[in-house]
Image: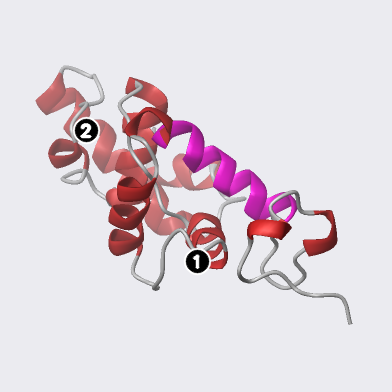
Amino acid sequence: MSLAEMEQAIKELGLYHNKAKNILATCHILVANYGGEVPGSMEALTQLPGVGRKTANVVLSNAFHIPAMAVDTHVLRVSNRLGLASGTNPDLIEKQLMSCIPRSQWIQAHHWLIWHGRRICAARNPKCPECPLSPLCPSRLLPA
């Protein structure tokens, strides 16, 4: 696939020019160095163009079922609001969550936190009155 074809295929995504370059470069590396297979280690994944810890953790947990904790904006916000972690550095948030959530639940916890952040604990207008975690949440908005 040419760069122009890849850009057209993913045009709906933000930053599609850069993502298209990274996808094609990654495909070439996977074929040349890994026999066309996606590697299953953090070290190998983060060596691929455009792949950082978050993406590597998503691949490890979802593709390989290896317990990992991917921290995106939803996970960061919700974990801070719930008092599970504190700070703005995703790597530190990842470590804090891994220390307070049992390893056997890391994959599910990542999805629970994302779902909660999208459906209930939105950035601008959290639905605290509807939230089942509200009684435990140190950040809940109290009724006026």
Position of 48 with respect to 14 (left or right) is: left
Res. 127 visible in picture:
no
Res. 89 visible in picture:
yes
94 part of magenta stretch: no
Instruction: Identify the image quadrant of residue 10.
Output: top right
How far across and down, in percent of the image, does residue 18 sit? 38, 57
Instruction: Identify the image quadrant of residue 39.
Output: top left
Magenta stretch mostly in which secondary structure? helix
- Please report the residue visible at 40 percent of the width from the left and 36 percent of the height from the top: 106
- Please report the residue visible at 69 percent of the width from the left and 52 percent of the height from the top: 133
Q: Quadrant of the N terminus?
A: top left
Position of 41 with respect to 103 (left or right) is: left
How far across and down, in percent of the image, does residue 121 sit? 69, 59
Of tags 1 and 2, which is closer to the observer?
Answer: 1
Residue 108's disc is none
Look at mark 1 in the image and give the residue it sits on.
80
Local crowd at mark 1 within 10 Å, few (<14), some, or many (≥20)? some
117 part of magenta stretch: yes
Instruction: Identify the image quadrant of residue 85.
Output: bottom left
Look at mark 2 in the image and give the residue it sits on.
28
> Is the residue 44 above or below the residue 73 in the image?
above
Position of 106 with respect to 139 (left or right) is: left
Q: What residue range appears in magenta?
A: 106-120
- Please report the residue visible at 26 percent of the width from the left and 38 percent of the height from the top: 26
Check disc 2 and give the amino acid type: His
Check disc 1 and give the amino acid type: Asn
Position of 12 with respect to 75 (left or right) is: right
Total numbered labels: 2
